Amino acid sequence: MQLIGRYDSPFVRRVGISLHLLGLPFEQLPLSVFSEATEVRKIGPLGRVPVLVLADGEVLIDSVAILDYLDGIVGPARRLIPPAGAARRQIQRAVVTATGAADKAIAISYERRRPPQAQSSDWIDRCRGQIEAALKELETGWPSTARLTQAEITTAVVLAYVRRVEPAMIATGTYPWLERMVADCERHPAFLACPLPAL
Ligand SMILES: N[C@@H](CCC(=O)N[C@@H](CS)C(=O)NCC(=O)O)C(=O)O
């Protein structure tokens, strides 16, 4: 399998970490959606990452579809999102809350790519408010399990991404439970194998 995209994308990083955690071999093609947009579009028409190219050439787009595929091939006991029931709903709620925060942090980073006079501080403030609401909810936690689930993986990569885009929002002590959980995750071999690239 080939994973297209760089680990500065929380969506690519959560797929890379999941692949490592599940012991599924892959190679990464770290294309940039900006400087290598033409190459990315040749593989996935939207020009977005992550994209996963399977051994037979089939192309999966969007981290949700990719992670669903991975959970399907590893079988019920090793899935990162449980197949059914309350545990599935609780973990899915945490995952979509975290990915929602990632969408808003990405929106801020794209807004900052515009000329300064074209940037909207109202829009950035709205996104910040949504990220804050998401992190407050995530701080209340979810039922813990003996092994990592997609809730921990996605929340940890999103927190690292928000810390990069909006460091003032994640001042030490603001989200103590999340900080501990994320620090534990970042020491895990699957996370160490997919580091957030230096700026
Ligand atoms: N819902 C998508 C979001 C992916 C996403 O936002 N990718 C960003 C990089 S972090 C991207 O490709 N941006 C380029 C663009 O949207 O044109 C997923 O879960 O994979």
Image (cartoon, rainbow, N blue to C red):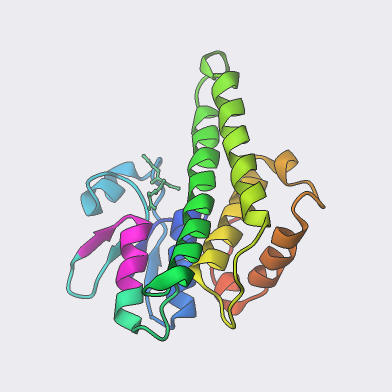
Q: Which percent across, then down, holds residue 81? A: 43, 71
Is residue 35 visible in the rendered image? The answer is: yes
Identified at 37% across, 73% down, the residue is 84
Looking at the image, which residue is at 74% across and 65% down? 180
Could you say where residue 111 lies in the image, as x and y percent from the top left? 51, 28
Quick one: 25 or 19, which is closer to the camera?
19
**Helix, strand or loop: magenta stretch:** helix
Expressed as whole percent of the image width and height from the top left, the position of residue 148 reads 56, 76
Q: Horizontal placement of 71 versus 145: left or right? A: left
Residue pushed farthest right?
173
Q: Is residue 23 left or right of residue 72?
A: right
Q: Is residue 67 above or below residue 73?
A: above
Residue 46 versus residue 115 in the image, above or below: below
Q: Nearer the viewer, residue 90 or 70?
A: 90
Q: Quadrant of residue 145?
A: bottom right
Residue under the image location 62 percent in, 55 percent down:
138
Residue 42 in the magenta stretch? The answer is no
Q: Which residue lies most toward the front here?
A: 86
User: In this figure, what is the number of numbered marks?
Assistant: 0
Left or right of residue 139, residue 107 in this image: left
Quadrant (top left/top right/bottom left/bottom right) for the N terminus: bottom left
The image quarter containing residue 108 is: top right
Q: Is residue 60 magenta?
A: yes
| In front of the other: 147 or 4 | 147
Q: Nearer the viewer, residue 140 or 186?
A: 140
Residue at the extreme top of the image, as rendered: 117
Q: Which residues are magenta?
A: 59-70
The percent coordinates of residue 176 (x first, y second) are 77, 58
Q: Does the rendering let one see residue 51?
A: no
Q: Residue at position x 64%, y 41% from top? A: 132
